[in-house]
Amino acid sequence: MEYEFHFVVDGIDVEDDAAFAVVHEVFGGVLTRHRDRHFLDVSESGANAIDAAHRIVVRLRTSLPALRLLRVDPDLVGVSDIAERAGRTRQNVQQWLSGERRQDKLPFPDPEGIAGRSPVWRWGDVNAWLAQFGEGDDVHPPTREEALTIDFLLPKWQRTLDDGLPLVHFTAAETGDGRDQEREDVQRLLEGTLALPGVLERMAAIPVPRAEHQRLTVVCAVLPDRLSSVISRIGHDEVWAVLACQGAKGELHLQPVGTAKAPGAVPMSELGLGREATVGDLLLVQTNGPDGTPVPPITPVGLG
């Protein structure tokens, strides 16, 4: 899904022709200034708003290293603004607020605050509410909860990039099969491990040719998960990821994996693994090898 962000930024200026051109030509974005503040409108795709923000932070750092994202602007709207954006009358909007219409849907969002004497709402919240019945616009700004999460994570993400380390994005190999808690346990175990000195540096040094060195996707899995599910979690703009799982004795395993386009990867077929192979099958091959010779754990494996 495509998400649109309205960031308050620092480090670049609308009068910087080179930066202005990058924003427009590379990102299709808009850089503006209001009084002493600069604002950046930019969009990015992702599994959710947090993932999309994670991606755009990395892309912006690559192209505009001086840029600093301070926070997500709430894009506050009043009744007239909502009516204009939704293509409805003010009376329609007032009926939504009072609950006279759309009573079968979730309640209208709570206002963010008061401007003058009138309530105002985050457009992201209103747009998400409108999406319940196919209205609103095709743009997906973050909701209040998503924006607050992004605001909390922005300093951490940018400090990590300042240190020359990649941003780690966690995702689950599969969901909804009753083993989600086990995959979350893998993530928590790895998060705790990454907090130790030097661990993230060693992960970043895994010898795989990543085109984008500032983002590292980690797919958390359990042994019965299919490798095809793992590969489906690699982003559309990525060819490499790290598979994380726990072995039979609870030990943490990290395995670089790639798509069919990943250069230098050992194909599954060479390891004797078929299309229905599981994470457990891969660990077994690492231990015994397809011909009785163990496969080094850091050998990049192509799952495509």
Image (tube, helix red, strand yellow):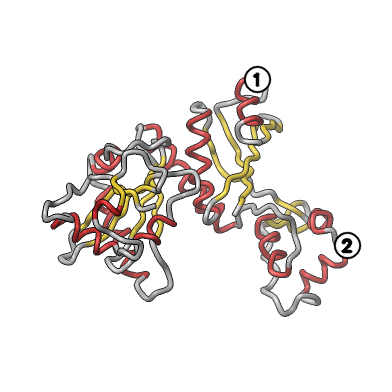
**Local secondary structure at mark 1:** helix
Q: Is residue 147 left or right of residue 90?
A: left
The count of marks equals 2
What amino acid does circle 1 point to? Answer: Asp
**Local secondary structure at mark 2:** loop
Tag shown at residue 89 = 2
Q: Relative to 242, is 198 above or below?
A: above
Q: Relative to 100, is 175 above or below?
A: above
Answer with the quarter of the image where residue 262 lies.
Answer: top left
What amino acid does circle 2 point to? Answer: Thr
Q: Nearer the viewer, residue 270 or 112?
A: 270
- Which image quarter is the N terminus in? bottom right
Q: How packed is label 2: few (under 14 Cα within 10 Å), some, or many (20 or more)?
A: some
Residue at 65% across, 25% down: 21
Q: Of the residues under marks 1 and 2, which one precedes in the sequence?
A: 1
Residue at 62% across, 45% down: 5
Residue at 53% across, 41% down: 56
Q: CA distance from mark 1 to mark 2?
A: 41 Å
Tag shown at residue 17 = 1
